[in-house]
Image (cartoon, coloured by chain):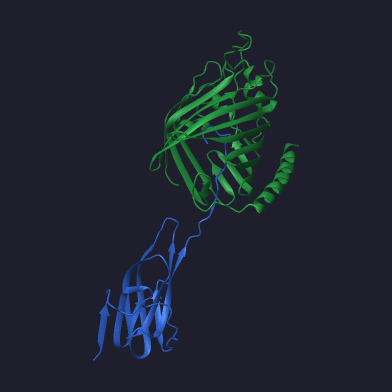
Amino acid sequence: MRRVLACISLSMIPPVNAAITTPEEPGIQLDISPKICTLGSSDKQCETTVHAQWHATHEESLCLVIVMRPDVKRCWEHYSEGTYTIELTFTDDLTFQLRDLSLERVLASEVLHVIREAIRYRHKRRQPWNIFS
Amino acid sequence: MAWRRISQLVIGLACVARAAAGLAADDCTQTGDDCVRVGGWNFSVGLGAGVRTNPLVHTQDIPLVIIPQVSYYGRRFFLDNLDLGVTLAEGESNTLSLIATPGYDRVFFYRSDLQNIFVNGVPFSAEVASSPHSTYNSQTGTLNAEFPSRPRHVTYLAGPEWTFDFRGISGQLDYVHEITAQDHGDEIRGALGIPLGQLWGTWSTNVGFTWKSSAIVNYYYGAPGIYAGGSAFDPFVKLGYVRPLGGKWKLTGFVEYERLGNAIANSPIVAQHHVTTAFLGASYVFRK
């Protein structure tokens, strides 16, 4: 029986980080939207709805996690595809990963990049001749 | 001829500024007193009370109530109130630009001159003294023949500007030539801004001068057959005060005394040898 495990919690999952180097599963594809968040000069952080979608050639049991965000975790058991939508606030790149249920092996990953508007500065005009300067 | 002189000056100064720029790392990493964000508009407005004396005969002093200030800095282009410019070379301490700036003396003849509007922000329907008919000679104390009425058009002058900063002292030197086909005159504007220190706020003084060629002097203050002056050298000194009031408000005040050169002061339409400008008020920065 198929069962969907969905949880967004501060549960005691193993720390998810980028240190795991297991090669990704070739039959599983992860896609996220948007892939880029652009910060303007007056923006301090990205606040956006992220839609994640995956599909596999065979039924899989896996979890969707975000590196360094242990509060986000959604799991599926014996599914060949799945979608997940979440509101996120972040300041740096987010790495979405599909992992096995033990969270030890990375099956697929995608990165949501944060791009900051390049802000240039220059000297003001020095104008001591102007009476209002 | 004037443009040839300007172009020679620009080339020479560009070499100096480029060398200085190459030696100095850019120290602008955020918006501050000396730095501004590229591509952003800057607005501020001063609200207070002040006055600029008018040296012309039978004219009223110019009130200062609202002083708006606007600027925009692109990577090279800049707009600084009524001045336009293109920065040719910029280093940590030296900047070379080509600027276009309005002729200053018209402010005494037309209250509606943009430089007066920018000073007090209030559009005036009446003009102060587009062409004074009074002919009191301040030198001789006698009345002269009728002074012919004529307009003084808006003029713009353009040329190279060198600005620098040395141990906190800022300097500015402009050589500009009239480009709007009115008087074809030249001006040299130079000034130093010197910080004086902190005492319930920040005090500073500016000293400088304007040299005006006879063409400019006569365009504003001369009359064919009645009065023709030579070139004029106008020195000035200013005392300024700024104190943060919290948020984006600052207390701002200054007093400036400018002495008019003899070629201007001797004109029969000039009654005073000097122009004094004073203002005290609060300024608000809309974006910084």
Residue B121 is at least partly visible in this image? no
Per the rendering, the colour in which chain A appears is: blue
Q: Is residue B49 left or right of residue B146?
A: left
Vertical order, A24 against B96 (above or below)? below
Residue B30 is at least partly visible in this image? yes
Q: Quadrant of residue B166?
A: top right
Outermost residue on the top side: it is B142
Along the line of sight, which residue is nearer the eye, B84 or A114?
A: A114
Q: Which chain is displayed in green in the rendered image? A: B
Q: How many marks?
A: 0
Picture coordinates of residue B178 (x, y %)?
66, 34
Picture coordinates of residue B150 (x, y %)?
60, 22
Picture coordinates of residue B273 (x, y %)?
59, 18
Q: Quadrant of residue A75?
A: bottom left
The residue shown at (55%, 27%) is B107
Q: Quadrant of the N terminus of chain B?
A: top right
Q: Is residue A114 left or right of residue B153?
A: left
Along the line of sight, which residue is nearer the eye, B191 or B180?
A: B191
The residue shown at (70%, 16%) is B225
Vertical order, B59 against B172 (above or below)? above
Q: Quadrant of residue A4?
A: bottom left
Picture coordinates of residue B65 (x, y %)?
43, 29
